[in-house]
C-alpha cells in the first residue's frame, strides 16, 4: 500500500504518520490508556491528514477515496482504535457536510475539522432503532428560526469528546420525516454518557449522546427538511468503504502476527499450518481488492450502495476469520490479553456490526438483485 494514487504526496505523509504517531501509542490504545480521540485527530491535523477528502480551499488535502482507504488501512494495521476514530471523523463525520452543506456551513466548520482542531461524530443509532433507522424517536421541533432537539442517541463513536455531531432527528413521519443537523457539543442541552467498556477497540470512545431541549439554529440544518435519511444513507455508502479498509488493515495485522510466530516456530523445527496461512492471505487480498474497487467507484461518482455493501460484508467477515486463525496459529501465547492476535480478534468483531450489521448488508445486496 505505498502507491501515491492522487499524486498529492499523501502516501509518504501517511507512512510517516503511522510510523511516528500511531505505532508508538498502539499498545496503550489497545489497553484503553492512550490519547483521547480528539488528540488523535489533532495529530492527524498536524500531519495534514485530518481532512483527506476535504478540498484544499477548505484546508484539506484534496485527496480521493483511494487515498482515504490507503490511510485507514495503514492506520488499522498499526491500531484499529485510531483507525475507527479517524474513519468516523473523515467519512460519516465530515462527508455529509462536503456533500450536503451550503457555503455558510462549509465555511464555518470544514477548516476546523480538516485542521484537526475539531473532532466530528455521526449520530444516527438509538436504543431500539439501529438497523431500522426510520424507527428513530429523537425529535426536532421547529420554533421560529431554531429547531429544538430532544432525544438520545446510542453507541456513538466519539461521544463525549467530539466537538461537532451530525445528528439525525425526526421532523415528520416516516423516512421522509427525518432531517440532519449540525450540532455543536458546547451548546446547552448536549451531554454524553461515559465511554462504554467494549470487548475491543478500547482506545475509541463509544457512548450515549443526550439532546435535552437543544436549540439548533435553522442555519445548521444540513440539506432540506426531510432529506436526513438520504444524508445518512449516502454517508453510510461511502462510510462502509472506510470500514472495509479498517477490516483489511486488521486482517493484515493479524496475518503479520501469525507469520511472525510461524516463521519463528519453523526456524525452531516445528510444523507450520501452511493451509491456514494461505487462506488468510487469500481472504485479506480479496477483501483489499473489493475495497479498492468500491473506493474507485465512489471517486468516479458511480452508484456505490451495492459495491460498498459487498466490500463491507466480505472484508469484515474476512477480518474476523483471519483474526481467529491468527489466534489459533499463535496459541498458546495468543491466550494473553495483549498478544497482537488477541487484540485483533477483539477489535475485528465490531466491524461486522457498525455502519450497518452484516445481516443488513445482505438485505441491501439481495434487495438490489431482486429489484434492479
Ligand atoms: C463500536 C461501535 C461503534 C458505533 N458507532 C456508531 C456511531 O458513531 N454512530 C451511530 O449512529 N451508530 C454507531 N454504532 C451503532 C451501530 O451502527 C448499530 O449497532 C448497528 O447499526 C446495529 O443496530 P442495533 O445495535 O440497534 O441492532 P438492531 O438493529 O437492534 O439489530 C439487532 C440484531 O438483529 C439483526 N437484524 C435487525 N434487522 C434485521 C433484518 N431486517 N434482517 C436480518 N437481521 C436483522 C441485526 O443484524 C442484529 O444482529 C456503533 C456500534 C458499535 C458496536
Image (tube, rainbow, N blue to C red):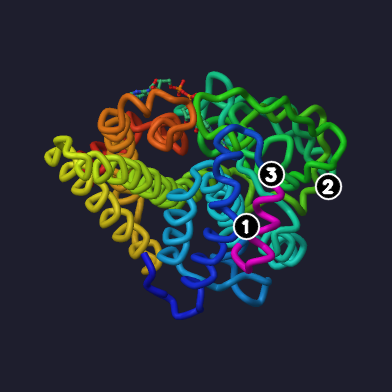
- The residue sitting at 40% across, 67% down in the picture is 299
Q: What is the chief secondary structure element of the magenta stretch?
A: helix
Q: Specify the farthest residue to the top.
A: 128
Are the two marked residues, 2 and 3, in contact with CB atoms closer than 8 angstroms?
no
Q: Position of residue 337 (x, y in %)?
A: 48, 26
| SS under mark 2 | loop
CA separation in Å, label 2 and label 1 = 20 Å
**Image quarter for residue 45?**
bottom right
- Among the two numbered marks 3 and 1 on one chain, the one whose residue lies closer to the N terminus: 3
- The residue sitting at 23% across, 37% down in the picture is 366
Examine the rendered structure and indicate whether residue 16 appears above or below residue 175: below
Camera sees residue 60 = yes
Viewer-proximal residue, 276 or 287? Answer: 276
Q: Which of marks 2 and 3 is in front?
A: 3
- The residue sitting at 74% across, 61% down in the picture is 112
Q: Mark 2 points at which residue?
A: 145
**Image quarter for residue 7?**
bottom left
Q: Position of residue 191 (x, y in %)?
A: 78, 31
Q: Which mark is residue 35?
A: 3
Position of 131 with respect to 151 (left or right) is left
Q: What stretch is highlighted in magenta?
A: 36-49
Rate crowding at label 1 as few (under 14), some (14 to 19) or many (20 or more) other CA atoms within 10 Å. Answer: many
Q: Which of marks 2 and 1 is in front?
A: 1
CA separation in Å, label 2 and label 3 = 39 Å
| SS under mark 3 | loop
Rate crowding at label 3 as few (under 14), some (14 to 19) or many (20 or more) other CA atoms within 10 Å. Answer: some
Q: Residue 97 carries which label?
A: 1
Examine the rendered structure and indicate whether residue 266 appears above or below residue 100: above
- The residue sitting at 41% across, 30% down in the picture is 342
Q: Does the residue labelled 3 lie within 8 Å of ligand 1?
A: no
| SS under mark 1 | helix
Judge whether residue 183 is colored magenta.
no
Amino acid at each position: 500500500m505505498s502507491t501515491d494514487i492522487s499524486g498529492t504526496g499523501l502516501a509518504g505523509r501517511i507512512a510517516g504518520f503511522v510510523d511516528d504517531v500511531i505505532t508508538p501509542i498502539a499498545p496503550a490504545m489497545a489497553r484503553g490508556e492512550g490519547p483521547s480521540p480528539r488528540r488523535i485527530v489533532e495529530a492527524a491535523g498536524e500531519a495534514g491528514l485530518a481532512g483527506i477528502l476535504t478540498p484544499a480551499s477548505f484546508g484539506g488535502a484534496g485527496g480521493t477515496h483511494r487515498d482515504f482507504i490507503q490511510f485507514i488501512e495503514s492506520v488499522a494495521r498499526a491500531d484499529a482504535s485510531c483507525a475507527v476514530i479517524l474513519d468516523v471523523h473523515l467519512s460519516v463525520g465530515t462527508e455529509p457536510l462536503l456533500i450536503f452543506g451550503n457555503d455558510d456551513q462549509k465555511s464555518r466548520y470544514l477548516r476546523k475539522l480538516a485542521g484537526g482542531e475539531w473532532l466530528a461524530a455521526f449520530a444516527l443509532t438509538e436504543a431500539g432503532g439501529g438497523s431500522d433507522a426510520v424507527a428513530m424517536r429523537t425529535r426536532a421541533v421547529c420554533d421560529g428560526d431554531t429547531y429544538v432537539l430532544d432525544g438520545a442517541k446510542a453507541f456513538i463513536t466519539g461521544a463525549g469528546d467530539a466537538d461537532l455531531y451530525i445528528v439525525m432527528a425526526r421532523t415528520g413521519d416516516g423516512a421522509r420525516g427525518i432531517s440532519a443537523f449540525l450540532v455543536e457539543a458546547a451548546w446547552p442541552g448536549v451531554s454524553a454518557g461515559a465511554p462504554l467498556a467494549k470487548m475491543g477497540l478500547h482506545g475509541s470512545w463509544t457512548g450515549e449522546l443526550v439532546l435535552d431541549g437543544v436549540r439548533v439554529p435553522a442555519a445548521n440544518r444540513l440539506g432540506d427538511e426531510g432529506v436526513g435519511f438520504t444524508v445518512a444513507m449516502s454517508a453510510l455508502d461511502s462510510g462502509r468503504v472506510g470500514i472495509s479498509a479498517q477490516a483489511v488493515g486488521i486482517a493484515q495485522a493479524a496475518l503479520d502476527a501469525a507469520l511472525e510466530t510461524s516463521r519463528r516456530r519453523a526456524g525452531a523445527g516445528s510444523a507450520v499450518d501452511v493451509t491456514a496461512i494461505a487462506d488468510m492471505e487469500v481472504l485479506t487480498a480479496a477483501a483489499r481488492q473489493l475495497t479498492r474497487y468500491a473506493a474507485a467507484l465512489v471517486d468516479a461518482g458511480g452508484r456505490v450502495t451495492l459495491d460498498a455493501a459487498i466490500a463491507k460484508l466480505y472484508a469484515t467477515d474476512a477480518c474476523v476469520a483471519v483474526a481467529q486463525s491468527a489466534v489459533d496459529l499463535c496459541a498458546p501465547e495468543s491466550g494473553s490479553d495483549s498478544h497482537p492476535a488477541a487484540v485483533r480478534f477483539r477489535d475485528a468483531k465490531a466491524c461486522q456490526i457498525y455502519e450497518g450489521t452484516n445481516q443488513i448488508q445482505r438485505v441491501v445486496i439481495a434487495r438490489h438483485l431482486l429489484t434492479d
